[in-house]
Image (cartoon, helix red, strand yellow):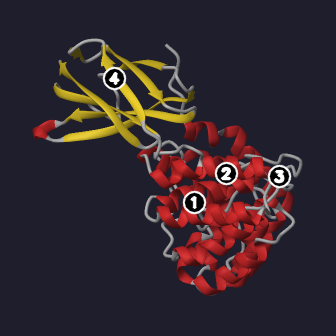
Amino acid sequence: MAEKFSLKDHLFNPQTIAQLAAEFAAGVPSFDASGFQAKALSGFAERELMERLEWMADCAEAQLAADFPTMASQLEAALPAPLDPSLRDDDFGHFIHAVPGILAVRHGLENHRERALDLLYEATKRFSMEFYIRPFLNRWPDETLARLALWAQDDNYHVRRLVSEGTRPRLPWAKSVTLETAQRVPFLTQLHADKTRYVTRSVANHLNDIAKQEPDLVIGLLQDWQRAGRQDAKELAWMTRHALRVLVKQGHSGALELLGYRGDVPVQAKLTLGAESYAIGDRLAIACELSADQTLPVMVDYRIIFARAGGKTAEKVFKLKVSEIKQGKTLSLSKNHFLKGDATTFTLYPGQHEVVVQVNGQDLARAGFQLTA
C-alpha cells in the first residue's frame, strides 16, 4: 500500500533544509550549516506544517545577530536569487524561504517597522510574504498602506501581487486583516490592468472574497473596469468569471447578467429523476429539458436540498452545463450524481431530499426523492 502523501514532509525534509542551511552559510560566514540542519530536522517529527516554519525560524535566529537591523541584513544576504522573472504565472516560491518574514514580524513589527518592511520587500521576490505583511497592516495600517502604494507600481510582479494578496480579507493559514473595503479598492483598481496573470488572478480572488459580503460593490467595480478599457478584453473577461465564482454559485442575477446570462427571458424547464428512492452510495440520475422562444446562452446548475439531522436541511450547488438554447429546439441535459456515503466533508442522512434546477440564476424546476441508508 502506497504511503499517504505528506505535504509537511514534502516541504520540509533533509534536502530542503540542507538547501536552506547552505544559503544561510553562504550569506552569513559564521553560520553553522550542519548544526542548523541537525537541530531543525530533530524538531520536525512533533510539529505540523506551520509549526515547522516557526521552528525553522527559531533555529536560524539562534545563529543570527540579536539586534534586528543587523539580523535583517544577514537575512537579506542569505536570500537565494529572485524567482525566475520569465515565469509569469503561479510562481509562489518555496516555503523554506518564509523564515525572513517570520523574523520580520517577531523582531521588526514594534520597533523597526521600516527596516522590517524593507526586508519583506526583498523576501517576497523569493517567497510570497502575504502571511507576514498582514501583522503590519493591522499594527501600522496607514504606514503600511503607504508602502503598498509604492509597491503597486514596482517593476517586480511578485511585489505587485503582494499588494493584492496581502490585503485580501481572509487568507488560508493567515491572520485576518482589519482594513475596510474602501482601503483595498484603489489597489485593486490599479492592479486589475496588470499584464501578469499571477497578479490579475490575485485581484480576481480578492474580489471573490469581497463578493461574499458586498456583491453589488464587486459587480460595480467590474463594470467600471470594463468601461475604462485599461485591461485586455479577454483577460478582463477571465478575471470577471473568476471574481464572480461565489456569486454565480449563489445564482446572483447581477453577476450572471454581467457574464451575459439573462434572467429576464422565460425558459421552460422539465426535470426528471431516474427513481423516487435512492440509497446512499447510488448514483442519482438527473435529466433536464430546456426550451425558450429565442436563442439564449444558459448557465445551468442544480441544487440538492439535503435532509440533515434533527429535521434540518442543507443545500449545495453543483454545475450542470454552460450551453445555449437554440430557438425552437430542446436542450437536453443529464447527470449522474454520486450520493457518496463516506465523504469527509459532508455526511448524508436518510430522508426526503429535493433537486432544484437553476437556469441563469432562476429556479425553474424541482423534484424530490427519498434517500435511504
Tag 2 and tag 1, C-beta contact below 8 Å: yes
Q: Is any atom of residue 228 visible in this view?
A: yes
Q: Which amino acid type is marked by label 2?
A: Met
Tag 4 and tag 1, C-beta contact below 8 Å: no
Whether 252 is drawn above or below 166: the answer is above
Q: In the rendering, which numbered label is found on residue 239?
A: 2
Taking the spot 58% from the left edge, 37% from the top edge, the residue there is 9
- Residue 171 drawn at (x, y percent): 53, 58
Quadrant in the rendering for residue 327? top right
Disc on the earlier residue, 4 or 1? 1
Q: Which amino acid type is marked by label 3?
A: Leu
In three-dimensional space, the C-alpha distance between marks 1 and 3, rounded to whole angstroms, equals 26 Å
Q: In the rendering, which numbered label is found on residue 271?
A: 4
Of 118 and 373, the residue lying toward us? 373
Q: Around disc 1, counting alpha carbons within 10 Å, would you say few (fewer than 14), some (14 to 19), or many (20 or more)?
A: many
Helix, strand or loop at mark 4: strand
Q: Name the residue tied to disc 1.
A: 207
Quadrant in the rendering for residue 140? bottom right
Helix, strand or loop at mark 1: helix
Q: Around disc 3, counting alpha carbons within 10 Å, would you say few (fewer than 14), some (14 to 19), or many (20 or more)?
A: some
Q: Closer to the camera: disc 2 or disc 3?
A: 2
In three-dimensional space, the C-alpha distance between marks 2 and 3, rounded to whole angstroms, equals 24 Å
Disc on the earlier residue, 4 or 2? 2
